[in-house]
Image (cartoon, helix red, strand yellow):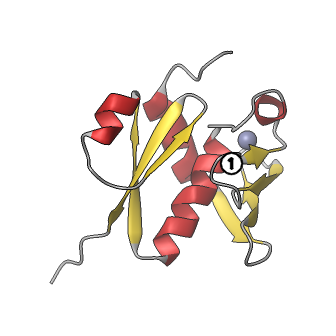
Amino acid sequence: MSYIKNTQQVFEKAHACSVTPQDKSGSYQVFSPSGAIYNVDISDPQRMTCDCPWGLHHSHSGCAHVVAAVMYSEKQKNRQVYAFNTVSAARMQHAPMFKLNGINLVSRRARVLA
Ligand SMILES: [Zn+2]
């Protein structure tokens, strides 16, 4: 099994993508800044998929496109996503987690600035 080496780099790439929901079940089209469009499915939290070259060869892909779709989906619930290298670091946040292949996401309620 191979892992994404740089969590922060993936997280930054995810922020540069734009996301369009395809339905209510968790299918998204993710537009990469390179111009490529990928199909992402996050409906099963245990098995998120993406049809990018990396995602096709890694189950439960933690590619930037899956991360972008999770960020989009959480944002609809007024939640913000943070990325961590290790499961233990993510657990210390005491918030809902998405354990992906090589990247651990934590979802927290977005702070509302008065
Ligand atoms: Zn991907």
Q: Nearer the viewer, residue 110 or 20?
A: 110
Quadrant (top left/top right/bottom left/bottom right) for the C terminus: bottom left
Question: Is disc 1 surrounded by few (<14), some (14 to 19) or many (20+) residues within 10 Å?
Answer: few
* Relative vertical location of residue 85 with respect to residue 32 in this rendering, above or below: above
Give the side of residue 85 with respect to residue 9, left or right.
left
Residue at coordinates 84% horizontally, 34% vertically from top-left? 56
Image quarter in which the N terminus is found? top right
**Rendered position, 73 above or below 85:** below
Residue 47, given in percent of the width and then of the height, sits at: 71, 45
Viewed as shown, does residue 70 lie left or right of 20? left
Residue sitting at the far bottom? 114
Residue at 43 percent across and 33 percent down: it is: 8
Q: Which residue is mark 1?
A: 33
- State whether residue 30 is above or below residue 9: below
Q: Residue at x 65, y 47 (%)?
A: 46
Would you identify the image quadrant in which residue 69 lies?
A: bottom right
44 or 32: nearer the eye? 44
Label 1 sits on what residue type? Pro
Q: Report the residue that reaches farthest toward the left.
A: 114
Q: Is residue 11 above or below residue 21?
A: above
Q: Position of residue 98 (x, y in %)?
A: 50, 47
Which quadrant of the figure shows ligand 1?
top right
* Residue at horizontal 60 percent and vertical 20 percent from the top: 3
State left or right for residue 7 relative to residue 114. Answer: right
How far from the left and from the top, in percent, is residue 4? 58, 23
Q: Secondary structure at mark 1?
A: loop
Residue 112 appears at what percent x and percent y? 24, 78
